[in-house]
Amino acid sequence: MPLISQEIANQVKDYFADLTGRVRLIMFTQEFECEFCAETRQLVEEIARLSDKVEAEVYNFVTDREKANELGVDKIPAIAVIGAQDYGVRFYGIPAGYEFSSLIQAIRTVSAGRPELLSPEGVQRLARIGSPVHIQVFVTPTCPYCPQAVVLAHQMAVASPMVRADMVEATEFPHLAIKYQVMGVPRTVINEKTHIEGAAPESLVLAKLEEALAGSRA
Amino acid sequence: MLELHLTAPERESPASGPEAGETGLYDLIVLGGGPAGLTAAIYAGRARLKTLVLTGYLPGGQPANTDVVENFPAFPDGVAGPELARLFLQQARRFGARLETDEAVRVDFSTRPFAIHTHKATYQGRTVIVATGVVPRRLGVPGEDRFFGRGVSSCATCDGFFYRDRDVVVVGGGDSALAEGIFLTRFARQVTIVHRRDELRATKIYQERAFANPKIRFLLSTVVEEILGDQTVNGVRVRNVKTGESRIVETDGVFIYVGMEPRTELFVGQLELNEQGYVVSDRRQRTNVPGVFVAGDVQDPLYRQIVVAAGSGAIAAMEAEKFLGEYPDVSNQPGSKAL
C-alpha cells in the first residue's frame, strides 16, 4: 500500500515539474529495520517515482559504514539530499506529517543549487562564514511551525559550504531530545550550544549563527 | 496510516514573480494565509486579479494548528485541521495566486500603490486585504518568558509528545483550552485545567467531553500567578480568586490558551483600530483607507470561526475587485497623495 496518496502525489509532481538539476535521496536503514526505517525507505522510493530528476539510493547503515561516514550520517533513519554537490542537507527520522513539506522543499532547493528563499543580504552574510556550522532543528511531525525552521536551516546549508543542517525528529531520538533539553519544538541548536526556541525569521537565525561563531572564537 | 501534510506554499520560479529583493506590482496583496486570506485569494484568482499572498509562518492559518475541525460545513465527519489547511492552500494556488511564506514587517498605506515591506522584498499592491489573524495572548506572569520552550508552550499538537506520562497544566476555559486539554490526555498522566472564572466559556460539547475524561481535573476561580522551575518548569503558583488562598501546583508543563489578540501592530497609526486593537471595518470589509480591506479574525472579536473568516475573505476580495474596477488608475485612487 502506498504511503503517498494519489492526490498528494499529483501535487508533488506539480511541485517537481520545473526541477532542473538531478537530486539523489541517499537513505540509510539496516537489515532489521528500525521503527520508522521501513516507512522512511518506502517514502523515499515513492518520492523518487514522482520525477525523473529524483533518484533513491538505499544503503545499509551497518554494512555500508564507509558511505555513512563519508556523508556524516550517525543515526537512522537518515536521508541525505544530494544535488550537483553535497550541500549538507540531512533528515534524521521520518519526514512525515508537516516535515513532508520540508523534504519536498529541500529537493526543490537542492535541485536548483541555490538558496532561493533567502534574502540577498542573508546570502551575502552566509558567504562570509569561514568556520564550520552545524545546525540541528528538532521537530515533531505534528508541528505546523517546524517546517519554517527546517527549511530556513536547509537554505543556509545550500548557501554556504561551511554550513550543514539536520532535521531531527525528536520523538525518534529521545536520547537527543534529552541531551539538548528539547521540550518544545521547533528548537534550533547551532554548534551544540546556541539555541533558538520557535520558528524565527531569517534575520534572527543569522544573528544567532554569527553570535555562535563569535563566541567560539573568543 | 502515515499522515503527510503538504503545506509548503513556495512555488517560486523566475516566471512567477520578482526575484527576492526586487519589487513587484500586484492588483491585490493579501497579508495572511489563513481561511480569510486564502478564501480572498480564491475569489481574487477567479476574478483574474494578479494576487500575492504573504502567508506568514503558519501557512493555512490556525486550522493548521488544530487537531480536528468539526464545525466547518460540508465535512460531516470532521476534517483534520492540517488537511483543511492544505485544501485551502491548494485551492488558492489553483486559481493563480502567488503564495509566499514571507510576512510583512512594515506597510505604507499613505502611498499609491501601497507598499509592503517583507523580510525579503518590497511589494506594491493596488489593493490590500489585511487578514493577519490573531496571536495567542500571553499570561504576562513571571517565568512565562524564561521557560518558553522549556515547559511553557502554546502548541499542544507540537509539544504534547514531550509530556508522556507527566503532569501538565492548561490555562484557560475556552474552546482551545478544553480541546487542547483533551488532546493532551493522549500523552499526559494528568491534565489540570486552570480557569479564572467559576464557569467555563467553551462550547458545551467540549465541556461534556472534558468532564467525562478521567485524566482531566479542574481548578476553577483560580489564576496562575507565577511559573516556577529550575532548568525546566516544575510548578505553578496559583491563587483562588474567591478565597485569596495561594498555593503551588506541581507540574512538568504549562500550556497557555487564554485567548487571542489581533495581530495589528503593523497598522497602528494607519488603520482605524478599536480599543482592543481589532481593525475597524464596515459591512463591506472596508477600512478607513480606501483600497485597504480587512477579513478574518483580525477584525472579529466576537465569533472567530473558520467559516466566518472565510466568508469575510470572500467579501473583501469581491470589494477589492469592485474597487479596482472603479479606480483602474492607482494615481486617482481616493486618499492618494501626490508623490
Image (cartoon, helix red, strand yellow):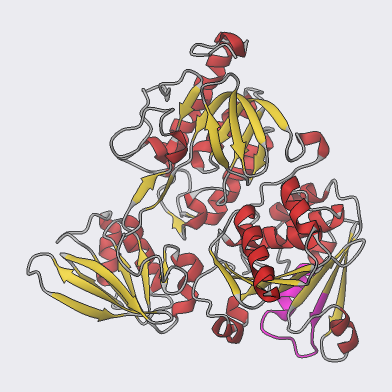
Outermost residue, left side: B243
Q: How many marks?
A: 0
- At which x and y percent is residue A207? 63, 59
Query: Of residues B265 and A45, which is closer to you in this image?
Result: B265
Q: Is residue B279 magenta?
A: no
Query: Of residues B295 and B103, which is closer to you in this image?
Result: B103
**Which residue is depicted at the point 22% across and 63% down?**
B195
- At which x and y percent is residue B228? 32, 77
- At which x and y percent is residue B20? 74, 41
In the image: residue A206, left or right of residue B245: right
Which residues lie in the magenta part?
Answer: A27-44
**Which residue is depicted at the point 70% across and 29% down?**
B24
Up/down of B37 relative to A120, above or below: above
Q: Quadrant of residue B168?
A: bottom left
- At which x and y percent is residue B201? 23, 54
Query: Is residue B191 in view from this perspective?
Result: yes
**Which residue is depicted at the point 43% across and 43% down?**
B263
Up/down of B126 relative to A92, above or below: above
Outermost residue, front side: A218
Query: Of residues B91 and B225, which is closer to you in this image?
Result: B225
Q: Quadrant of the N terminus of chain B?
A: bottom right
Up/down of A171 relative to A50, above or below: below
Q: Is residue A37 magenta?
A: yes
In the image: residue B148, left or right of residue A152: left
Query: Is residue A104 in view from this perspective?
Result: no
In the image: residue B241, left or right of residue B261: left
Q: Quadrant of the C terminus of chain B?
A: top right
Q: Quadrant of residue B257?
A: bottom left
